[in-house]
Image (cartoon, grey):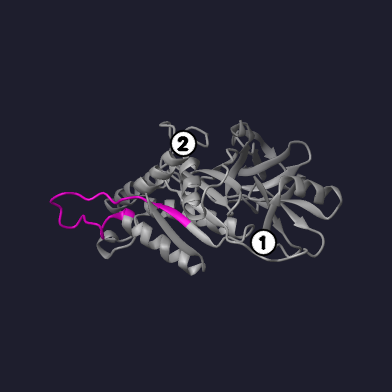
Amino acid sequence: MAVPVLDRNKEPLMPCSEKRARKLMKCGAAKPYWKQGIFCIILEREPSGRELQDVAIGIDPGSKRTGVTVATENTVVFNLLLDTPYWVKEKIKFRKELRRGRRIRNTPYRKCRYNRAIGGIPPSTKARWQSHLRVINIVKNIIPITDVIIEDVAAFKKKGARRWNVNFSPLEVGKKWMREQVDALGLKYHKFKGYETKKQRDYRGFKKTSKKLDDRWEAHNVDSHCLVEMWFGDITPFKGLYKCEFLNHYRRQMRLSNTKKGGKVRPYGGTLSMGLKRGTLVRHVKYGKAIIGGSSKGNVSLHEIYTNKRISQSVKVEDCKIMSRLIWRPRFLSDMCK
């Protein structure tokens, strides 16, 4: 594993080894820095050189888990194991039910729109591809990546259906949208078929587990590693990984869907808690590092970083020191190195 390196202006440089990073911090030439939970170092002096090499990010997309590997020609920088935002489909379905209920009552409502008839990407599909794009943007801020390599998932085609073809498939529409976004970032886009990934996996003798939800390198990162190898050549695998779960925010609603006794309703949801963005990493005087949750009676709640377990529900804002804003709950699984 390598360590991302930034200059004084937080511009990405080529990563260095863990041993060199420790030496730089020990002599005061660098200081530690975390970007969305990923460990980096910031140089306190002008770097000896700014020459850049090719750095690729391999992405193995899945419906519930995604494997990501960032590597140079010689070494793996780090691995990411991501939980995709699977909750979007149920939220859209619930919103649809509420809108239908308002249309049959004497209450203001939005006119029905035929979104699928005018094209576009289904929200659940777009959310998954947007999560991949988010990862690329985060990595791009700490590693000077040049190439994006994605496993090309084949679209499902229905027999005898006139409209359900390769162009209409939401998967194909999402893949096309993703390529346009990567091109807009100025990165090179590459894709390999699933059978090519398997061929490389068999050639290297890597084993892939059938348990897709396991927190193991063999679940998804084995394929993302193979994608990078098919571009650069054989690279010594690193089986440690960052497990990252995207934060699920409840957007602001006019009120709760179910009324209380007497027909009373109250507002629900939102992404701000007493002026602080939910998901903000703070340091509390008593509880240490925690994530901002909801709010109640002028106080905010704090949650454990890795498990999202609520620590306290009545914390004063002035007792919290803001550190950073997270989009996921990161955790480094060092036992995967065994």
Q: Position of residue 44 (x, y in %)?
A: 81, 59
**263 left or right of 338 in image:** left
Q: Is residue 109 above or below residue 21?
A: below
Q: Amino acid at mark 1?
A: Pro
Q: Say which of 337 and 314 sits in front.
A: 337
Q: Say which of 230 and 10 sits in front.
A: 230
Q: Point out the tag, 1 or 2, that comes first from the N-terminus.
A: 1
Residue 269 in magenta stretch: no
| Cα distance in 3D space between marks 1 and 2 | 34 Å
Q: Amino acid at mark 2?
A: Gly
- Secondary structure mostly seen in magenta is loop
Q: Give the residue pinned by disc 1.
A: 12
Residue 309 in which image quadrant: top right
Quadrant occupied by the N terminus: top right
Q: Is residue 310 above or below residue 104?
A: above
- At horizontal 79% and vertical 40% (from top left) the residue drawn is 285
Quadrant occupied by the C terminus: top right
Question: Can residue 240 be seen in the rendering of this structure?
Answer: yes
- At horizontal 44% and vertical 32% (from top left) the residue drawn is 209
**117 left or right of 16 in image:** left
**190 left or right of 312 in image:** left
Residue 152 in magenta stretch: yes
Q: Say which of 290 and 131 sits in front.
A: 131
Question: Range of the magenta residues?
Answer: 149-171
Question: Can residue 38 be seen in the rendering of this structure?
Answer: no
For label 1, the crowd category at 10 Å Cα-Cα, with few meaning under 14, some 14 to 19 and many 20 or more, is many
Res 205 label: 2
Residue 212 in which image quadrant: top left
Q: Say which of 316 and 48 sits in front.
A: 48
Q: Position of residue 276 (x, y in %)?
A: 65, 52
**In terms of secondary structure, where does tag 1 sit?**
strand
**In terms of secondary structure, where does tag 2 sit?**
loop
